[in-house]
């Protein structure tokens, strides 16, 4: 998609807007928008999640977006707001995030304003709920993996085979 002319034009416009915002509102070493272009692993992005007041995942179509979950896990102080496109798979899980329709620009702007003005207690309550849900999901996944592992082991013992090998086969 980065080779498409329309996409590149949009990226150029976004970068221009960010430059204008940062030029207008930067104070000393602080700038309001940190724009990271490219692909980063969790270790590289973690420090930015740790200091971000707001994380916006505005995908138009996506699977289980890990950025949202990484943001929540990085905010151990629970002091941040997650804005999440309703078109991401993770929006079905992370209902305490502020959900947006990225096509609805006015509503998106209102939600961003709400996030900027959100009282600290509400931020903490929302992120705590998301964090607890993530822990429940992880516990459920771990339980299912344990159950499946036991089933495979029991089936292997009963059938005398494990992963296609007979118990008496040499490794």
Image: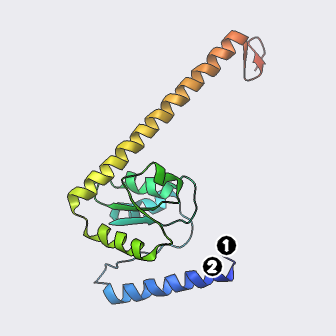
From this view, report whether residue 144 is shown above or below residue 40. Answer: above
The colouring scheme, among rainbow, by chain, secondary structure or one colour, is: rainbow
13 relative position to 96: left or right: right
Q: Quadrant of residue 25?
A: bottom left
Q: Could you give the CA–CA distance between mark 2 and mark 1, rounded to whole angstroms?
A: 7 Å
Q: Earlier in the sequence, mark 2 or mark 1?
A: 1
Q: Residue at x 59, y 24 (%)?
A: 149
Measured from the top left, where is residue 71 in percent x and y?
A: 41, 57
6 horizontally vs 44: left or right:
right
Pointers 2 and 1 in contact (C-beta within 8 Å)? yes
Q: According to the image, label 1 marks what residue?
A: 1
The part of the image, by quadrant, that contains residue 164 is top right
Disc 2 element: helix
Residue 147 got which mark? none
Q: Quadrant of residue 152?
A: top right
Local crowd size for mark 2, using a 10 Å CA cut-off: few (<14), some (14–19), many (≥20): few
Q: Nearer the viewer, residue 84 or 161?
A: 84
Residue that badge 2 annotates:
7
Name the residue rendered at 41%, 72% in the picture: 108
Q: Which residue is painted at 72% across and 12% down in the image?
A: 159
**Residue drawn at 22 percent across, 60 percent down:** 120
Asked whether residue 76 is in view, the answer is no
- Image quadrant where one finds the C terminus: top right
């Amino acid at each position: 998609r980065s080779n498409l002319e329309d996409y590149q034009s949009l990226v150029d416009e976004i970068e221009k807007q960010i430059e204008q915002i940062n030029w207008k509102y930067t104070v000393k070493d602080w700038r309001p928008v940190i724009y990271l272009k490219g692909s980063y692993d969790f270790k590289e992005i973690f420090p930015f999640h740790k200091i971000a007041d707001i994380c916006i995942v505005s995908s138009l179509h996506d699977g289980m977006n890990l950025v949202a979950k990484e943001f929540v896990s990085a905010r151990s102080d629970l002091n941040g707001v997650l804005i999440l496109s309703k078109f991401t798979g993770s929006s079905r899980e992370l209902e305490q995030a502020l959900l947006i329709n990225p096509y609805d620009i006015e509503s998106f702007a209102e939600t961003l304003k709400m996030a900027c003005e959100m009282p600290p207690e509400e931020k903490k309550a929302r992120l705590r709920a998301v964090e607890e849900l993530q822990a429940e999901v992880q516990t459920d996944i771990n339980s299912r993996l344990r159950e499946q592992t036991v089933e495979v082991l029991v089936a292997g013992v009963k059938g005398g085979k494990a992963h296609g090998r007979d118990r008496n086969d040499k490794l």
